[in-house]
Image: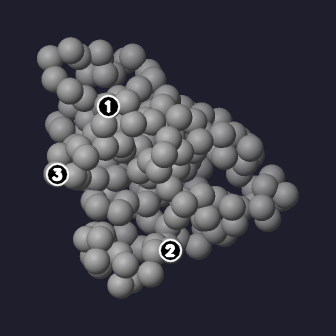
Amino acid sequence: MAKVLVLYYSSYGHIETMAQAVAEGAKKAGADVDIKRVAETVPEDIAKENHFKLDQSAPVIEVNELKNYDAIIVGTGTRYGRMTSQMASFLDQTGGLWFEGALNGKIGAAFTSTATQHGGQETTLFSIITNLMHLGLIIVGLPYSFQGQMTLDEITGGSPYGATTISGGDGSRMPSENELEGARHQGELVAKTAIKQFG
């Protein structure tokens, strides 16, 4: 059975919620799925002062665990149009895996969240995808088989490069059902791709 990792960083819970939807989709396809997160690098007093969601149930991952998976789906919010420093710091620790070629040929994907519709969703996805490609992963996006990203009936995230959500400037908007469905669709597609390649 293909093993899928949904790896995320979430300051306020938006990406945590999207990660759970991605995992639902991957499980639906028949994969063995784990949800893990990268370590928080912000000092605890500052995180509390800024209302970070610190009670997340997903365990914190160690870098060498990545080699145990057939597919890795990475999600993080955006910071100025690129991935968060927490996720970047984690990925910067994968040099040994890169040197070994430990992730070559595995399946990769990305999802993200921004405050606004045009707040860097696609550039953030590409900042994640670029890292995954350097590590040798084969990228799966969110194709137009998910028609929800085409809707004009509501404000929504979604991109052919990966599932996305919009949080609002004050973080009060949680992922919509359409955005969650996009995350499920991408998770399912990644898992099906991994199952075809790895069984």
Query: Dot 1, how many residues are within 10 Å of its Cα: few (below 14), some (14-19), or many (20+)?
Result: some
Judged from the image, the secondary structure of the residue bearing numbered disc 2 is loop
**Label 3: which residue?**
172
Any part of residue 163 in sight: no
What's the distance in space between the residues labelled 2 and 1, CA to CA?
Answer: 27 Å
- Where's residue 178, x and y in %? 21, 31
Q: Residue at x 32, y 31 (%)?
A: 117
Q: Earlier in the sequence, mark 3 or mark 1?
A: 1
Q: Please, which residue is most extreme toward the bottom here?
A: 45
Q: Which residue corresponds to mark 2?
A: 41
Please identify the residue farthest to the right as the structure is shown. 99
Query: Which residue is painted at 57% across and 36% down in the image?
Result: 126
Report the residue marked by disc 1: 117
125 with respect to 103 (left or right) = left
- Dot placed on the residue nearer the N-terminal end, 2 or 3: 2
Asked if disc 2 and disc 1 are in contact, CB closer than 8 Å, the reply is no
Residue type pointed to by label 3: Ser
